[in-house]
Image (tube, rainbow, N blue to C red):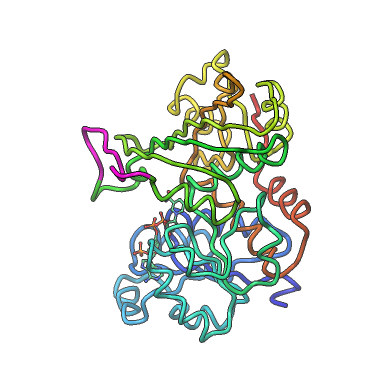
Amino acid sequence: MGVNGKVRVAVNGYGTIGKRVADAVNLQKDMCVVGVTKTKPDFEAKMAVRKGYDLYAAIPERAELFDKAGVKIKGTVDDLLSKADVVVDCSPGKVGAENKAKYEKAGVKAIFQGGEKASVAEVSFNALSCYDRALGKNFVRVVSCNTTGLTRVLYLIKENFGIKKVRATMIRRVVDPKEDKKGLVNGIMPNPITLPSHHGPDVQTVLDVDITTVAFKVPTTLMHVHSLNIVPEKDVKAEDVIEIFEEEPRILLFSEEDGFTSTAKIIEWAREVRNRYDIFENCVWRDSVSVVDGEIYLTQAIHQEAIVVPENVDAIRAVFELKSREESMEITNKSLGIGELQI
Ligand SMILES: NC(=O)c1ccc[n+]([C@@H]2O[C@H](COP(=O)([O-])OP(=O)(O)OC[C@H]3O[C@@H](n4cnc5c(N)ncnc54)[C@H](OP(=O)(O)O)[C@@H]3O)[C@@H](O)[C@H]2O)c1
């Protein structure tokens, strides 16, 4: 398969998620990026070329825009797909479903993102909760940032203590930092106002659990925050929950005594230790993990731009049946420095 036995990966949509997935794929020994796409020759397109990625026009009719701007492309998305074994579709939400026909025509496997409906793919994916379900599949959807964050902690709690019921409140960053066309300047927006938010049903695409979710958007761009209340099947102490989180590299525990009093402080830490301040792990506040009347409570922060990146790498390994779940997650974790608090 591919180049020197490496899986050849196309990234369709070199935006917030696409650029991070491309860089993460490039760090793996068993896969390589054969090209990335953009619809327009802006600074992100120029930076992709500067970083050494072969650039292609995502929309063939727009290829001449790149020529006019003097940005070198190697062809259109169809040319790129002819050189790939798998495409990671990182186009805006709902556009992936429109792109699917191209992938079927080209005979490439495809990994979609959480902005797509679950029906776009054969299975939805989270590495911890259902890696094996994606083995050998052609179309897989990596669930969204919020769903990935919820699923990781709930999977661990379910495996260890069982779960009767989950109630979760998502306090969502309104837009990503680069956004300058939309946002919420002043206000707190119940989103949606009706219950449940889509996150609970989305978690159920990758984990069998009874969950109800409520979500709000707030004027911040850095991270989401989740407040969780979990009714376990077994008797459990807060220390038991902390212990299982300490053992999982994709969960990091942050303490108030270290000064981690808000998402602003967690991002300030990440600015020191991570490229693009990307945090691929769930950031659980250690001090928030509590058991009251037999129910578990915890608060976590999720870096929306980064958390799904390792899952995309693992999904590629799963669809080609390259490694087991444990092997793939370990390789991905090591390559991205996952699980290292470094303080
Ligand atoms: N950002 C997050 O917080 C986050 C977290 C988890 C999952 N997701 C999901 O990941 C997906 C991508 O989101 P994003 O935040 O990375 O979006 P984004 O930053 O807006 O990037 C989208 C990229 O797709 C390109 N594109 C536009 N139309 C396209 C088309 N028809 N075919 C192929 N590429 C096209 C854009 O190129 P141009 O810029 O040149 O137009 C851009 O590079 C969505 O499903 C989203 O729901 C996002």
Q: Main secondary structure of the magenta part?
A: loop
- Residue, x 31% and y 45% (percent of image)? 192
The extreme bottom residue here reads 105
Looking at the figure, which quarter contains the C terminus? top right
Asked if residue 130 is positioned above or below residue 87 in the image, the reply reads above
In this rendering, the count of numbered labels is 0
Name the side, left or right, on which 24 lies relative to 264: right
Looking at the figure, which quarter contains the N terminus? bottom right
Name the side, left or right, on which 58 lies relative to 156: left
- Residue, x 58% and y 79% (percent of image)? 108
Looking at the rendering, the quadrant in which ligand 1 lies is: bottom left
The extreme top residue here reads 257
Query: In the image, residue 199 lies at what x, y percent?
Result: 45, 48
Asked if residue 185 is positioned above or below residue 52 in the image, the reply reads above
Of 103 and 117, which appears nearest the observer? 117
Quadrant of the image occupied by residue 341: top right
Of 84 and 217, which appears nearest the observer? 217
Query: In the image, residue 298 lies at what x, y percent?
Result: 54, 27
Query: In the image, residue 43 lies at what x, y percent?
Result: 36, 58
Quadrant of the image occupied by residue 218: top left
- Residue, x 48% and y 70% (percent of image)? 120
Q: Is residue 207 magenta?
A: no
What range is drawn magenta here?
Answer: 183-195
Of 313 and 180, which appears nearest the observer? 313
Query: In the image, residue 35 lies at what x, y percent?
Result: 53, 70
Q: Is residue 194 magenta?
A: yes
Of 172 and 207, which appears nearest the observer? 207
